[in-house]
Image (cartoon, coloured by chain):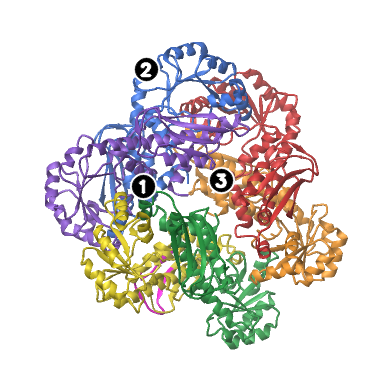
Chain colours: A blue, B purple, C yellow, D green, E orange, F red
Amino acid sequence: MDNLDKLIALAFFEDSGLGDITTESILSESFSGMGAIVAKENMVIAGIPVAKRVFHMADPTSLCTSVFTDGDNVTKGDIVFKVEGDLLSLLKAERIALNFMQRLSGIATLTRKFVKTLDNTKIRLTDTRKTTPGWRTIEKEAVRAGGASNHRFSLYDGILIKDNHIIVAGSIKNAVEAVRARVSHLMKIEVEASSMDEVKEALNAGVEVIMLDNMNLGQMKKAVKYIKGRAIVEASGNVSLDTLNKIAATGVDVISCGAITHQACSVDLSMGINQK
Amino acid sequence: MDNLDKLIALAFFEDSGLGDITTESILSESFSGMGAIVAKENMVIAGIPVAKRVFHMADPTSLCTSVFTDGDNVTKGDIVFKVEGDLLSLLKAERIALNFMQRLSGIATLTRKFVKTLDNTKIRLTDTRKTTPGWRTIEKEAVRAGGASNHRFSLYDGILIKDNHIIVAGSIKNAVEAVRARVSHLMKIEVEASSMDEVKEALNAGVEVIMLDNMNLGQMKKAVKYIKGRAIVEASGNVSLDTLNKIAATGVDVISCGAITHQACSVDLSMGINQK
Amino acid sequence: MDNLDKLIALAFFEDSGLGDITTESILSESFSGMGAIVAKENMVIAGIPVAKRVFHMADPTSLCTSVFTDGDNVTKGDIVFKVEGDLLSLLKAERIALNFMQRLSGIATLTRKFVKTLDNTKIRLTDTRKTTPGWRTIEKEAVRAGGASNHRFSLYDGILIKDNHIIVAGSIKNAVEAVRARVSHLMKIEVEASSMDEVKEALNAGVEVIMLDNMNLGQMKKAVKYIKGRAIVEASGNVSLDTLNKIAATGVDVISCGAITHQACSVDLSMGINQK
Amino acid sequence: MDNLDKLIALAFFEDSGLGDITTESILSESFSGMGAIVAKENMVIAGIPVAKRVFHMADPTSLCTSVFTDGDNVTKGDIVFKVEGDLLSLLKAERIALNFMQRLSGIATLTRKFVKTLDNTKIRLTDTRKTTPGWRTIEKEAVRAGGASNHRFSLYDGILIKDNHIIVAGSIKNAVEAVRARVSHLMKIEVEASSMDEVKEALNAGVEVIMLDNMNLGQMKKAVKYIKGRAIVEASGNVSLDTLNKIAATGVDVISCGAITHQACSVDLSMGINQK
Amino acid sequence: MDNLDKLIALAFFEDSGLGDITTESILSESFSGMGAIVAKENMVIAGIPVAKRVFHMADPTSLCTSVFTDGDNVTKGDIVFKVEGDLLSLLKAERIALNFMQRLSGIATLTRKFVKTLDNTKIRLTDTRKTTPGWRTIEKEAVRAGGASNHRFSLYDGILIKDNHIIVAGSIKNAVEAVRARVSHLMKIEVEASSMDEVKEALNAGVEVIMLDNMNLGQMKKAVKYIKGRAIVEASGNVSLDTLNKIAATGVDVISCGAITHQACSVDLSMGINQK
Amino acid sequence: MDNLDKLIALAFFEDSGLGDITTESILSESFSGMGAIVAKENMVIAGIPVAKRVFHMADPTSLCTSVFTDGDNVTKGDIVFKVEGDLLSLLKAERIALNFMQRLSGIATLTRKFVKTLDNTKIRLTDTRKTTPGWRTIEKEAVRAGGASNHRFSLYDGILIKDNHIIVAGSIKNAVEAVRARVSHLMKIEVEASSMDEVKEALNAGVEVIMLDNMNLGQMKKAVKYIKGRAIVEASGNVSLDTLNKIAATGVDVISCGAITHQACSVDLSMGINQK
């Protein structure tokens, strides 16, 4: 059982772990049913594979189809998902599948807006670790569906040296050396810098990526100019649809943005279920 | 391990299940640290007990304190949470605790706006099952922190007979009888009605609660008048800050509303951590 | 894995978690087998779906059939269950399936005796929470197979205010109000009353159900007369085959009875298994 | 988490997995409480360590004491168990602890009756695998508390060759050789024999234990005489309080008996809980 | 999920629990593949059923075949295992299956050398509890594949009274009596003896097996002579390919040897995988 | 419960999951005990933190101390580990702690020999994924204790493009582009090359690391010369104590070696336990 299965299992458990007493009181025999999820507004769809897993967990023999894949633009009225299977299972899975797809499509839709803004640049827009606890993987997939890239997945698949690390280590140089000795030769090292001094120190320590943390536009420009391609430059902090273009104009390579996940709301999808 | 612990464990796993390689490369010995979570905007705070559990899971000996309790109004700049404990654990728990509190306080804050609108009425505002999968319990707690009430928690602790049930059973009467025979004498029965005919049929079947499903204001008024206290009347569908007062004016007893959970965004909280 | 699967898994584990060393030493290849469970005395059968799950867990491809359903009267000599599948799996599942069915049929058989006694009344006989730890769901199903009804399943799907609650709350009224504010509008509230004063207080507090706790027949009659249909009346305490009719005569609506689960012994079933 | 903890966890889950809504609505702060379990009839007490685990799981800081140990005779009115701890936890654990102790003490009490009957003999009375699924370990402890011995715990810690094994192996000799080759030199081998021919064949195959399966008294006597101490002799089948003495008189070494577990009913215990 | 499945799940988790990012970046659709495991040196093969389980866990529809069974001698160049299935799953399972088979075949190969040395004797060579933590069952199977026998599997399926037990009990006699009273009549009792006095005391206490612990050859001969068949005699300690024959010549019945598991290294196997 | 706890739990389960029947029959009360682990030969010690976890799982109140840390050279006779705690728990944990430490110290000791050979070079010696299934993390720690570095931990924290990937992608260039698009900007990309053509193609595709797979010494020299610092160069295949120096002389940056884990045997440690 992987992490997503565990989250879906939690979702089923909290909703019908001891059964659906209304339905079970009424359905004494088993019926086949079919359902269709319809977009109630325009959106970038995401979460189709998650919905498949939800219906599959409720009824392993259920059959799910979709003419769309995550990342497609869908229009109000489009049927984005169809499922056939045991009626009782469909009724149990319905609300859960919708709750997942609505939020994930909300993220993809919002992300797409951010990405569009950067259309004529070569800048990589990435997410952050500011995701819904338990949802990391699927929200990062929704971000990719929206057209952005992922930053490190977690604290163990990427190195990011922050101020607390530097304080404990004594200096950026010490921190970088300690990390270099410990991790595999397949990992780049990123350091968070909030001043030009720190940028210089990081560059001297031989880091591959420098994060400009909450710098203003002027500082960012200066830093980019100084670094001059010797490290990948990432901008972080105060990234919104309003500020995005200005940050892009500073010449950074990467912009990381928490808003594409934590400021996304659910979009509207509904499901019709019929006995077959 | 209850459901919330499982969700928190998922959150830790996805973020640092194999460790925090940056920090572990640098921190060879253990330090004590202290952290403070600060409100970056005005909000109704929620998720304090969740944050405690998060820090406790990272370090069972950590000490958490707060001068606030869930549901309190806090002002930009207020310290809403303090924690002391093992520094490495604080660094691991920081992002997770914030991600939880930001979303839960977002829900409480939005809910409070809805509740205020109903201030001079005796109407009970409730949530729905449109919650973030895996988060049912804590989102329902955030709803209560915001001042609203909870609808049934799940499919097994409340009876709600919907159209699919009625179709399978043949009639509202049949459905109600099947359910009455099967469940304990401590459960009320609610039926979803979308027309006056269904309202009448439900009332004749002796149900204790009637949900007026997506009715317009005129229909609702008529239904309330007809029912005349013989059942609790619940309005459902298209509930927003704009429509709330009008629905209230129809005389219904309960209004259930999905927006207070699925249209809430994270509010802004940040955490400072220092070596002690 | 739901709760019943967990219980069955425990049962398999404790019996053959590290294998069946006798059988495995002898059966080097796999054989098909068939088995039949026979009633060795007259009984009300229960646990057929549980037995299916047991054989299914041992061998997911096993084929189970029965001409009976839970609640049927069977006669000594009847074949109540047939199964075909992998011989080694049948040998592992045999004892467990029998241990389940023997106890559950014992409960159904005893419950049927209690229910028959109330045949000419409209009284609802229910079980209690005095069930075998780990077996709550299946024992409550056996109770329904025997013809009785279920009381609340657990502490979270029904409200029952007892003396300890009243002491802490200060009064029945306080306790009822605290509960009413906290739970959904789909829940009735029951209060345990052991005197007429408490009955009156409960009725004034607007409770929907009153449990007469260990009252004698005279007290019960008085209480029923006083309540006069304004609440459902439940009798509890000292319910046996001897006292059942007298309690019924007091006019209560519901009688709850622990003996139908905790005084039931296993009935006699045996299984024959042959290589096919 | 060992098997017993898993069973207790199932018991808590089924009873209050999502909370005790009545109590939680009323107890907003935490109180200390104390409880006492009282015998309502004479019995052999068992399950004291199980009850401790139950209260400990609800509240790890609870303090349990008892002047008795499993196997002691207690008299109506005796306080058999005391506990102090968090009041809410006591209320949650109460019913579960009682349900365990009532059944286990019922087994110990019934077993004691069987054992007394054999008082002036050197015969070992043992249980069987006919135990409540999920309860194997604790029912076998209750059997020892009652004064009897345990047969093998499961299919993997003892060898018992039955008719199906013999059929598959071709002969008792073949079966014994196959097992001997496979298992460690620390295991004895028992064969089930239902005729004198099988007794002789088993003895020739060098088995250490012979079970006389459902033989009548005459057959048993003959078998004992023939075996003459060359193997341990165990009687099995139709063992009740009525037949026990007659079986004992045949000279067998061991009598195994399912009734001491599956014909035992709960004895009566009750618990009082007070705020401290 | 049995113990081996748990170990395999750990192995998958540690290797690809969050995916195989290289492969997943490249394989956007699913392909069928086939693989073959080849012996790169002569060996006694073991672990074929384990490899099947590994591939089955990665892809339940994979098809595994082998012309060999555990314990067969295979020659450099032999294809010992074939598998067809989903390509991505084969790539994930490859390293794990090899890691298992290489170590298990290493154990079987080394064990075979020990067993050959005893070819003309009737002595039973057994393993010990000195196995790789988590691998007990499969290493004991590899030992049998190599031609040796198993000692007790664990601390609960065989009795072995050691010096610490004797000290606590006060004497060998006391220890034996305490154990005899507690365990089933299907268990033999073994005592560890390191002097002739202890051998005599054990024999007087009626034990069925005596372990001569780290005795020299002369002591062992004396002990065997004294015991004269009244108990099974097991030699333990300093067992290597060099000492094996001399120990055998002392006349003991059983020799237990940790080296066959903890001194075994992986043998060389490799796997080729192709798209089908 | 992290992965190591799960492995230790498996180890306890397989050894004493249902108890230690010998000890439990004899120890009716609880005693305190102390134990000391002694080196029976010279070695590089590893696994001290694992042993602590083992004793802690058996008895959370046990107190473990050591004057050594992983990676220290210890001499025959040194006491490498001391523990005080509940005697029964020490007896249960003893064999498991030893089995872990013996194997891990064996790996550290063998690794140290390899590392010494490279003493006067700047070459990084790394392990591979050829580790004992279930033991990945702790064997990689033992490798570091021995003085070598770790390669990627698993398939998800490092990119390694192999021949199968290249075939599916069509070319090295395609494969590299697909991966670059999908993974975070914190990951380097390594390609396995078995010819100069592949080395050139990889370099042109902009990879950061090139693995020379099973090349002979001449090929390696040529490749190093051609690459000339534009990528990190890793040698892989046929790495043994005999070949190590020659490979080092080719000028590669990194040598990865499976033998340091899969050709390591247990070293000799023993434990004495006394009642305190």
Stretch in magenta: C61-82
Report how far apart the C-alphas of labels 1 and 2 lie in the structure.
41 Å
Which residue corresponds to mark 1? A55
Amino acid at pointer 3: Leu
The quarter of the picture where residue E183 lies is bottom right
The mark nearer the N terminus, 1 or 2, is 1
- Of all chains, the one bearing label 2 is A
Which residue corresponds to mark 3? E10
Which disc number belongs to residue A245? 2
The crowding category of the residue bearing disc 2, from other C-alpha atoms within 10 Å (few below 14, some 14 to 19, many at least 20), is some
Could you tell whether C262 is left or right of F270 in the image?
left
Report how far apart the C-alphas of labels 2 and 3 lie in the structure.
46 Å
| Residue at the spot 79% in from the left edge and 54% down from the top edge | E239
Amino acid at pointer 2: Asn
Say whether residue C91 is magenta: no
Of residues B92 and A145, the one drawn nearer to the viewer in this rendering: B92
Element class at badge 3: helix
| Residue at the spot 53% in from the left edge and 17% down from the top edge | A231
Residue A266, x across and y down, in percent: 31, 36
Extreme residue toward the bottom, this view: D218
Element class at badge 1: helix
Element class at badge 2: helix
- Of all chains, the one bearing label 1 is A
Amino acid at pointer 1: Phe
Q: Is residue B138 above or below residue C248?
A: above
The tally of labels here is 3
The quarter of the picture where residue B256 lies is top left
- Of all chains, the one bearing label 3 is E
Residue A255, x across and y down, in percent: 43, 22
Q: Is residue C256 above or below residue F173?
A: below
Question: Is residue E69 among the parts visible in the rendering?
Answer: no
